[in-house]
Image (cartoon, rainbow, N blue to C red):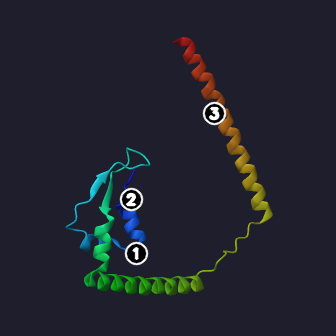
Amino acid sequence: MSQPWLISVLQIKKRGWTNALIRDFLKDERPESHLNPKNEQFARMKLYKLKRIEEIEQTEEFQRAFAKSRKRSVISKAAHARKRERASELVPLKPDIYTPDYLREKLIQKSGESFDEFEIDRKYFIESTSEADEYF
């Protein structure tokens, strides 16, 4: 169980940090390693001191990098939305698939034949394994 003065990487990301910000600003910090509370077999959790995170967030250097990161994020999301909108114009939302009734009936018949073959194979397998059990 984590202490209130320690914060996980996930919690740091919820504060708006990115992987690059964590890499750049916490590279000299040594995280504490704790067992994962969800399952001890999961990877150990890296926990950082909350006080140190708050101190870093107050620095001018971090403020500039954070603002730059937010700006890139907004631009990236807008570009992604434009691409998605263009793609939706090119591809119809619902493909028109037509299956004639005679073809549908053949498909149903074929699926029934396949099921019958499966049942025959299954019965043969069960019979052959029960004979083998009697032998051993």
Q: Which mark is residue 4?
A: 2
Q: In which quadrant of the rendered view does residue 31 lie?
A: bottom left
Going by the numbered disc 3, the residue's amino acid type is Asp
**Type of amino acid under label 1:** Gly
Q: Position of residue 99 (x, y in %)?
A: 74, 66
Q: Is residue 119 above or below residue 136?
A: below
Q: Residues within 10 Å of mark 3 (few under 14, many from 20)?
A: few
In this orientation, which residue lies closer to the viewer: 80 or 121? 80
Nearer the observer: mark 1 or 2; the answer is 2
Which picture quadrant has residue 40?
A: top left
Q: CA distance from mark 2 to mark 3?
A: 62 Å
Relative image position of residue 124 (x, y in whole percent)? 63, 28
The residue at the point 67 percent across, 44 percent down is 114
Which residue position holds label 1?
Answer: 16
Mark 1 vs 3, N-terminal side: 1
Q: Tell us which disc is closer to us: 1 or 3.
A: 1
Nearer to us of marks 2 and 3 is 2
Left or right, 114 with respect to 14, comes to right
Q: Which mark, residue 121?
A: 3
Vertical position of residue 91 compared to residue 108: above or below: below
- In primary-sequence order, the first of circles 1 and 2 is 2
Where on the picture, by quarter, is residue 95?
bottom right
Q: Secondary structure at mark 3?
A: helix
Q: CA separation, marks 1 and 2?
A: 19 Å
Per the image, label 1 sits on a secondary structure element best described as loop
**Residue found at x 27% / y 81%:** 59
Q: Specify few, some or many for label 1: CA neighbours under 10 Å numbering under 14, 14-19, or 20 or more.
A: few
Check the image and name the residue furthest to the right: 101
